[in-house]
């Protein structure tokens, strides 16, 4: 099967007649000569025409040629140079050649041995059967080099290879395994097009894999293989290395066995289609360092059950509303507490219907979840603890409340009593206590301390931190109804509302 590009060239030839090359004939080959740097490129008399070298069976390309008393170093083979030279059985290329154009040997059906030198791998005969290991030291795989090798079963690309040309493994339908070396930095357009038999991609360095520039979706063998192996072990829970600063386009697209992804704070951007079609991915945490996410980056990750974005400013999403195309918009989207409203209005992010503040967790022992007017604490039972003292302060000196719980997590006292408006304590699960305190001010930062003490009053453990309630504080907030009117808390003071009038606790009219 020939590439789309070749089909286009055939059409051009049919419509325009024979296309002549501008080469000069030296010996039995044609060359394009560059008088500037004194280099020569092997070409042909007619582009993509079987008549060029149809009468030759063996070719040895020299490292240099002389024309008009000037010597030229042979450094390249142009596209289609030996196209359909079906009588060729052997080709030898010198080490002076550092590049080979696309389809240079395509259609050379009687070639029996691979064509390569110490720099570039040019061609594998389509009759080759089984596994193939590209020799170490080779730096480039030429475009179409393995095209139509339908009996090739596996290929190992060494660390020395830096570039894989377009359509390099086109239509290798029985290729099942590809090992990609750590040195590869680019893979051309449709390099693995129609490699439908692929079942695994093997790599040795995750950071190196992240550094590859893919020319498109089918440049990445994962498009068909779906399974990525790191040093022989399939990657299920992906942890991006700290050395990675950006996740490239298509890098993990189609990796269907991923369950979770952890992205470090070193990453500032996520490329387009980076995780598209990772259908078993259940959770993703995007760090606060990420500022941009490319189009379709998480499209059709239909297995996601939650999404966390730690960035205070919602990252810019490419191409409008396609970043999370095909993702359930009713799953929890956890974002910084102070950014909930920003995410609710940001393009792409606003499509999620369940945006919540990220639960605050202190060293994996106490979890804090604020809303506009409440704060929920959860903490594990501490060995030998007889009481737990929980205090909440606004600013540094303004005590909001002091709550004391017994060894079973039951509230036994509160100071001051009027502030103790929390729910009844309960065990969330075995050895885990929870308590929700109400009547806080919106848009306000508080600090907390949880102290566990033994029966003698000795401190066993101390946990402390801070949190911010959601929203923006208003002038008079949070009514507490009694027989004298409606009491409201503002800046630590109590005010009484009667109709539209506001009085201080001593009865003085405020407004």
Image: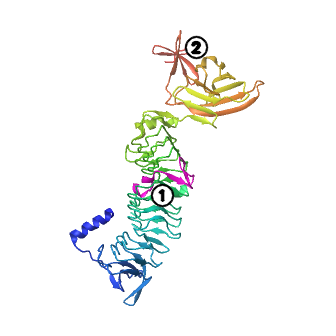
In the rendered image, residue 231 lying in the magenta stretch gets the answer yes
In the rendered image, residue 229 lying in the magenta stretch gets the answer yes
Q: Is residue 279 above or below residue 94?
A: above
Residue 261 position in % (x across, y down): 52, 45
Mark 1 burial class by Cα count in 10 Å: few <14, some 14-19, many 20+: many
User: SS at mark 2?
Assistant: loop
State if disc 2 and disc 1 touch (CB < 8 Å): no
The magenta stretch spans which residues? 217-244
**Quadrant of the rendered image containing residue 427:** top right
User: SS at mark 1?
Assistant: strand
Task: Give the left or right position of residue 24, taking residue 212 as reference.
Answer: left
Question: 244 or 338: nearer the eye?
Answer: 244
Q: How is the image coloured?
A: rainbow
- Where is mark 1, residue-wise? 177
Taking the image as drawn, is residue 195 in sight? yes
Disc 1 versus disc 2: distance between alpha carbons? 82 Å
């Amino acid at each position: 099967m020939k590439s789309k590009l070749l089909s286009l060239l055939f059409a051009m030839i049919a419509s325009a007649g024979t296309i002549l090359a501008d080469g000069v004939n030296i010996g039995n080959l044609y060359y394009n000569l560059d008088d500037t740097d004194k280099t020569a490129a092997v070409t042909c008399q007619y582009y993509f025409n079987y008549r060029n070298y149809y009468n030759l069976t063996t070719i040895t390309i020299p490292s240099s040629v002389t024309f008009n008393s000037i010597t030229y170093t042979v450094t390249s083979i142009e596209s289609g140079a030996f196209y359909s030279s079906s009588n060729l059985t052997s080709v030898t290329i010198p080490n002076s050649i550092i590049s080979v154009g696309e389809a240079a040997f395509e259609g050379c059906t009687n070639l029996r041995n691979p064509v390569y030198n110490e720099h570039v791998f040019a061609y594998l005969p389509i009759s080759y059967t089984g596994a193939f290991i590209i020799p170490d030291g080779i730096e480039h795989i030429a475009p179409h080099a393995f095209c139509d090798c339908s009996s090739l079963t596996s290929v190992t690309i060494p660390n020395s290879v830096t570039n894989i040309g377009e359509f390099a493994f086109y239509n290798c339908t029985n290729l099942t395994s590809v090992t990609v070396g750590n040195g590869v930095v680019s893979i051309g357009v449709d390099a693995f097009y129609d490699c439908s038999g692929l079942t695994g991609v093997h790599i040795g360095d995750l950071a190196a894999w992240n550094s590859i520039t893919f020319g498109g979706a089918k440049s990445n063998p994962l498009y068909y293989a779906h399974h990525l192996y790191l040093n022989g072990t399939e990657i299920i829970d992906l942890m991006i290395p700290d050395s990675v600063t950006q996740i490239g386009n298509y890098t993990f697209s189609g990796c269907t066995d991923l369950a979770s992804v952890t992205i470090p704070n070193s990453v500032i951007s996520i490329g387009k289609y980076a995780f598209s079609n990772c259908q078993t991915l259940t959770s993703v945490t995007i760090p606060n360092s990420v500022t941009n996410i490319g189009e379709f980056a998480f499209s059709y990750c239909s297995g996601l059950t939650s999404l966390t974005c730690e960035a205070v400013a919602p990252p810019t999403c490419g191409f409008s509303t396609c970043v999370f195309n095909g993702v359930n918009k009713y799953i929890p989207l956890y974002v910084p507490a102070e950014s909930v409203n920003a995410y609710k209005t940001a393009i792409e992010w606003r499509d999620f219907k369940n945006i919540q503040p990220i639960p605050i967790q202190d060293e994996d022992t106490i979890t804090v979840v604020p809303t506009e007017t409440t704060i929920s604490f959860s903490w594990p039972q501490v060995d030998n603890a007889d009481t737990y003292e929980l205090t909440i302060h606004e600013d540094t000196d303004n005590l909001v409340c002091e709550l004391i719980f017994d060894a079973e997590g039951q509230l036994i006292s509160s100071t001051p009593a009027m502030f103790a408006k929390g729910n009844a304590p309960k065990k969330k699960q075995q050895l885990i206590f929870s308590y929700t305190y109400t009547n806080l001010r919106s848009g306000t930062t508080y600090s907390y301390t949880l102290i566990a003490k033994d029966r003698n009053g000795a401190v066993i453990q101390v946990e402390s931190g801070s949190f911010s309630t959601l929203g923006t504080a208003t002038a008079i907030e949070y009514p507490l109804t009694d027989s004298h009117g409606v009491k409201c808390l503002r800046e630590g003071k109590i005010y009484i509302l009667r109709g539209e009038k506001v009085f201080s606790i001593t009865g003085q009219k405020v407004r």
